[in-house]
Image (cartoon, rainbow, N blue to C red):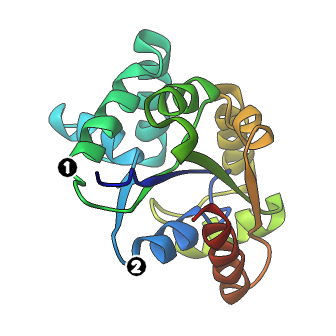
Amino acid sequence: MATKPVVIGLVGMPASGKTVVAEHLAKKPGAFRIHLGDFIWDWLKRRGVKPSEEAGLMASLYLWAEYGDIPIAQWAINEVKKAKGKKLIILDSLRTVEEARIFQVKFGNNFHIIAVLASPAARLKREQSRARFGLINKLTFRMRDREELRLGVGDLIASSNHYIDGNQSIASVKKQTDAILKHLR
């Protein structure tokens, strides 16, 4: 009988370092990464909406208010089914406690939440340097943080099983990630 994969849900505020952790884990043998934000971007694309920070946030809020956490969670579970034979599943960018509960029910003791933490100053600096959808000012950054917290990211961070200090160097973040993974396996 095949062993069930370890399923890791990553949570953190924007620009906390989740992508560094997810990409590092995805390079491990037998790993499969699912970015939950892809559900939102695909949903917008099907409706002909140009991707932007605001459109992504508004779509997230609309879907959450209208349908709850089930559509994104079910989409992710369907994506996991495509990962047959994989030993490590990374669910990148969880947002709510309810979403995590759905995964906990589905994957049981094989599901673990890792929170990546970084200070607002460090995160703002990262956001400004990457300028994914153009420059971001401090007010926009704080407003987006507030909306993320309203969705429940803070509660999910507080209920995480493991924590990574995203204020550290990339090498340190990877080292912390490896230590957690070793513990989980």
| Residue holding disc 1 | 82
Q: Nearer the viewer, residue 105 or 102?
A: 105
* Quarter of image, res 177: bottom right
User: What is the crowding at mark 2: few (fewer than 14 residues within 10 Å), some, or many (at least 20)?
Assistant: few
* Quarter of image, res 59: top left
Q: Residue furthest top?
A: 66
Q: Nearer the viewer, residue 97 or 37?
A: 97
In this picture, is 121 found above or below 139?
below
Q: Is residue 3 left or right of residue 15?
A: left
Q: State the residue at coordinates (68%, 57%).
A: 137
Measured from the top left, where is residue 86 in percent x and y? 30, 61
Q: Residue furthest bottom?
A: 171
In this picture, is 19 found above or below 172?
above
C-alpha gap between disc 1 and disc 2: 18 Å
Mark 2: which amino acid? Answer: Lys
Q: Is residue 83 left or right of residue 171?
A: left
Q: Nearer the viewer, residue 113 or 86?
A: 86
Q: Quadrant of the C terminus?
A: bottom right
Identify the mark nearer the N-term, 1 or 2.
2
Mark 1: which amino acid? Answer: Lys
In this picture, is 128 found above or below 104?
below
Q: Residue furthest front?
A: 1
Measured from the top left, where is residue 142 in percent x and y? 75, 45
The count of marks equals 2
| Residue holding disc 2 | 27
